[in-house]
Structure formats: structure tokens, C-alpha cells
Image: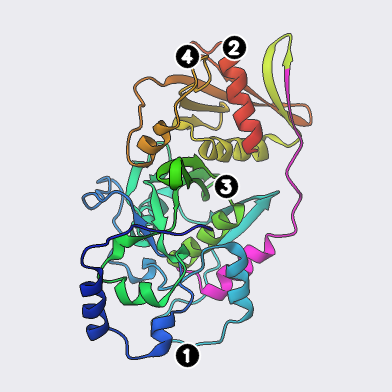
Amino acid sequence: MRTRMKTRHAGVSVLMALALLSGCSDVNQLLGNEESVDYKSTRRGEPLSIPPDLTQANADPRYRAPASGTTTYSQYQQQGAQAVAQPQNTNVLPERADMKVERDGNLRWLVVQRPPEEIFPKVVDFWTDTGFTVKTNSPQAGLIETDWAENRAKIPESWLRQVLGSVLETAWDSGEREKFRTRVERVNGHTEIYISHNQMLEKRTGPDNGQVQWENGKEDPGLNAAMLARLMVYLGTDVDAARKLVQQAENQPQRPAVQQSVRAEGAMLVVSESYDRAWRRVGVALDSGGFAVDDRDRSAGDYYVRYVDSDTGAKNEEPGFFSRLFGGDKKASATQYRIHVAAADDATQVTVLDANGQRDSSATAQRMLSVLKDKM
């Protein structure tokens, strides 16, 4: 991982002297230790307003974020192996029996035996308390999307950062930005929660690496799992119990076969899974693929999405990524489609329908299916 430091020639000596005078007397503090997740949003906004028909849970101590955590799933597992039992406070909640983690291939999700009306606002609070600005808060669509944020814990510790960090916090940058999507869905009387994320990586180009270009990174299923475990703790599960529940979901069937074809009846994906599993997987693929999901109807098998085709003949310029990173979304030009999921014998078919409900086999529809296949 590359770490950059924005140079500030003027006044650095003065800042260092002030920091040393007011700073650390402990050598270990200067050297620093491994940090936990510490997200800082790239955009700050007003405190999030929760819809009036949903209950605000900020005052409930059961739903306060854990004080520490880990950035990746492997680190989360290592922490579990090294965990030392701590004295229990009488105010600490007992292990909850109303939550479990399920898995299908590399996809994990949380099942909570509580209604979405109760869970949704608490998930919103989880993201804001974790350090994110919430960009999309749609109870109707069951969607929560954060703005881009930097995990400051990914910046390696050094004595210089320890000395100057509090004085010149913006001097260090991890070169990475992430945003998370959470889908909250009512299924058979309980709530299912799915977490996915997008990543942007900074790339230095041009003479002397003086220009900055942001590129799409690869989604890490382990990071999704780690954030899912943190959400469980936030919702009241003991840390060790959350770890065990995530680990118990490990030995499950791998991802299904997904084939894309153009038949006489039109373009489609054929997923070698039952309808319920395929519906779930398509929903997460839409989240990971960056589709704007306006609504969904599980009984009809429809996701209502908006999609901007980036490959209609004119190549999108890379600087658009930078505007996306700091708030330049252009939703007005997006076309609405329906992603239709239907059972077909022992498999499931996924097709694209236009605004009139007709099968769409255009080049754009085929590209949409390609994105879904890649994310599934």
C-alpha cells in the first residue's frame, strides 16, 4: 500500500517543536501501535434526519459502536485467536439469540429476528457512528449508502505521524477511499441485512508522479464480513459471539454457476440456484455494481433500477471518477429499468425489462447483465 504525505515546507519546524513540547514522553507512544477501523468521511454534512415513522436509537446504550475493531476479516479472525477474557460489567447485554449469519459462496448476510422498522434506523446510526456521512437513506427501498470515506487506520504509524498527527492531521493520506451500501430487506417475518462496498485507489501519474488519478479497486468480501460482524456487536451481540457466528458461516456451498446467453426470447443470465438464493445474490450484485435501486418487489421478482451506460460509443474520461469521489453524481441522465428474476426449472433466469415492461436485449441491457454476472 502506498502512503503519501502532502508537503508543507513552511512552518514544519515550528510545528514539530510545538508538538514535541506538548507531546509524548513514552517511546511506545511515539512508535505507535496497530490502529483499528477509523473512517473519516470526505464530506461532512448536517446530522442525519431519521424519517418520523422510524425510531431514533441514539440514546439506547445497546446500539453504541464498539470502541475498537479490525479492518479486514483475516485481522478480525487473528484478533479472536488472541482475545483475552475481560471482566464483565453488569450493564453488558447477554449474548443475543435473535441474530445469525448465513452464507452462500462468498456472500454473507445477517438475519435478525426483528422487523425492518426497528432495525433500519439502527443501521443508519451504525454508519454515522463509524465515521461515515450517509448519502442515501431510503427506508422504502431498504437502502443505506454512505459517502466516500478514508480509513485512517490504514495509514502506517510512524514517530513523525505520532508527533505531528494532531497538529497537521490532513498531511497524511492512505490513498484509498471506500463507500458502503447496506440493503435491509423483510423476508418471512424477519430482517436480512447485506453489506457491500466500492473502493477507489489513488494512482500517481505524469512527470514526477505529480498528477492524481482515482481508479476503481476490487471489492473485498472479507471487509464486508468484518463490517457485518461489527454491525452485530452494535446491535447487541457479544464480540466473541459475533466472531463465532461469522466463522460458523464459513463452510457453505461455493458461488453458483452463472451463464450469460442470448436466446430467441432475449438476453438473460441463467443462475444455477433456487429463486430465493438467486434473488438475494442479484440484489447484492446490483449494490456492488453501483446500480441505483429505487424499489423492489420480491413477490413479482422485480428490482427497479436506474443505470447510466458508460459504453455507448464515447469513452468516459477518467477525471469523472474524481468528481464521483467528491460528489459529482449525475442521476438525471440515468434510464430506469427493471431487473426481472424468475424461477426456471431447477435454475433462475435474470432478464432486463424496459420502462414498458418489455424484454430488453439491446447492447445496453447485455452490458447490464455482464456487470451483474461479474459481481455474482
Q: Nearer the viewer, residue 121 or 326?
A: 326
Label 1 neighbour load within 10 Å: few <14, some 14-19, many 20+: few
Task: Find numbered disc 1 in the image and state the secondary structure of the residue it sits on.
Answer: loop
Is there CB contact under 8 Å for labels 3 and 1? no
Label 2 neighbour load within 10 Å: few <14, some 14-19, many 20+: few
**3D distance between C-alphas at marks 2 and 1:** 62 Å
Q: Amino acid at mark 4?
A: Ala
Is there CB contact under 8 Å for labels 3 and 4? no
Q: Amino acid at mark 1?
A: Pro
Q: Residue furthest front?
A: 207
Is there any visible trace of residue 36 in the rendered image? yes
Q: Amino acid at mark 3?
A: Glu
Q: Which residue is mark 4?
A: 355
Which-is-in-front pick, marks 2 and 3?
3
Is there CB contact under 8 Å for labels 2 and 3? no
**3D distance between C-alphas at marks 3 and 4:** 30 Å
> Magenta span covers which residues?
236-261
Residue 247 image point, x, y percent: 66, 65
Label 4 neighbour load within 10 Å: few <14, some 14-19, many 20+: few
Q: Residue at x 29, y 48 (%)?
A: 43
Q: Amino acid at mark 2?
A: Ser
Whether the magenta-drawn stretch holds residue 242 is answered as yes
Q: Residue at x 50, y 40 (%)?
A: 215
Q: Which residue is mark 3?
A: 219
Q: Which residue is mark 1?
A: 87
Task: Find numbered disc 2 in the image and state the secondary structure of the residue it sits on.
Answer: loop
Is there any visible trace of residue 89 in the rendered image? no
Which-is-in-front pick, marks 3 and 4?
3
Q: Which residue is mark 2?
A: 362
